[in-house]
Amino acid sequence: MTNDVNFQKAVELINKSKRVLITTHTRPDGDACGAVAAVYDTLISLGKKAELILPSELPEWYEFLFAKKPAILGKDVSVEQLKKGEFFQPDLIILIDVNSNNQLSKFAEVLKQNKKSVIVIDHHMTNDGLGDIELIDTDAAATGLIVFDLMKYAGWKLNKKIATALFVAIATDTGWFCFNNTDSRVFSACAELIQSGAGPAKLHNDLYRDFSVQRFRLMTAMLNTLELHFEGRLAIQHLLRDDFKRAGAADKDTENLIDECQRIGTVEAAALFVGLADSRFKCSLRSKGSINVRLIAQKFGGGGHTMAAGVHLAGPLENAKQLIKAEVEKQLQQLDK
């Protein structure tokens, strides 16, 4: 857990700051979106001027967390505009759910010339040391938990909107309390968030039972590519750019689709390869616990957690698949000794 010294430093810096810019990693997931929304709403309630900018599109199913849709870097504002302060001139930058240049995309260019203070709030192992103050807790199931602890430490009030955002952050990063990272700390925090107004039943319905037709078609295309290796212990699937076109779907529609194949009892690890416009593949990796997918991702320049990680790999697809298969096989051989 993050120590009180760092919490105090972060609170002091936030209190003396007047203009705060907040961002997170590319392809923001529920933890990133929920934690970002909670921090933003808290800063506004404290009388700060705050702005949000995301390095890639916000998934539409998380839009309800924001009073206004965050600006997208490269779409709503250019890197040069951000560097020149034409979008916003902050005296503090907060990076949430990320501490890696690779995961910041073009926002990393902004940080390289930045002279303002930076706070990092993150729970990932991958750490480029981007913050002047870093609230890092790799034992936390979600970055939303660290934000929750910060708010408790600072005495900042939880309202229904902030509680809802933090509940989304924690619930989604624990697979709605099904992943092995779900512990008593998670349930204790969520109990307080429910008391503050978060509604689990409605949130679950809105997030998991409200697919667009396009997203459902994309999932169908993915399921049709299923490969099982090593006696069903590794599941591999892929999506190509043509699959997105046929489904009418976007990259953001892939979130959590990798989890579907883990319903197969024999599967211990899963990989989903998504073709990118530059001919590379984004490989998302998941594990039920026996395989450390973070080690695999890190070998090729990626990162993440023991049971959830990601990496970008060069094509062609079969070569990218073989790299991952070989690393999973090595770990399975060690497990079987």
Image (cartoon, helix red, strand yellow):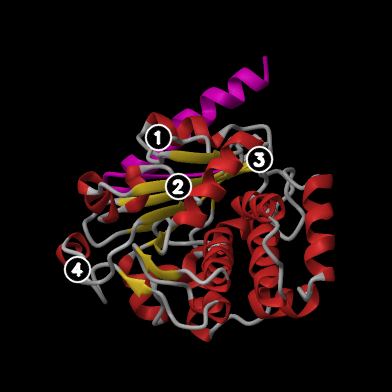
Relative placement, left or right, of 305 versus 288 is left
Residue found at x 46% / y 83% = 68
Kindly report which numbered mark, 1 or 3, lies closer to the viewer in this rendering: 1
Query: Which residue is disc 1 drawn over?
Result: 129
Q: CA distance from mark 4 to mark 1?
A: 25 Å
Between 294 and 57, the residue placed more toward the observer is 57
Between 104 and 12, the residue placed more toward the observer is 12
Q: Do the numbered discs 1 and 3 sit on residues whose CB atoms are within 8 Å?
A: no
Kindly report which numbered mark, 2 or 4, lies closer to the viewer in this rendering: 2
| Residue type, numbered disc 4 | Ser
Tag 1 secondary structure: loop
Q: Main secondary structure of the magenta part?
A: helix
Q: Position of residue 166 (x, y in %)?
A: 66, 63
Q: CA distance from mark 1 to mark 2?
A: 10 Å
Q: Do the numbered discs 1 and 2 sit on residues whose CB atoms are within 8 Å?
A: no
> Is residue 66 visible to the viewer in this orientation of the structure?
yes
Relative placement, left or right, of 73 versus 256 is left
Q: Position of residue 41 (x, y in %)?
A: 56, 71
Quarter where residue 257 is shown: bottom right
Tag 2 secondary structure: strand
Kindly report which numbered mark, 2 or 3, lies closer to the viewer in this rendering: 2
Tell me the magenta residue range. 308-337
Q: CA distance from mark 4 to mark 3?
A: 42 Å
| Residue type, numbered disc 3 | Glu
| Residue type, numbered disc 1 | Gly
Q: Residue furthest top?
A: 337
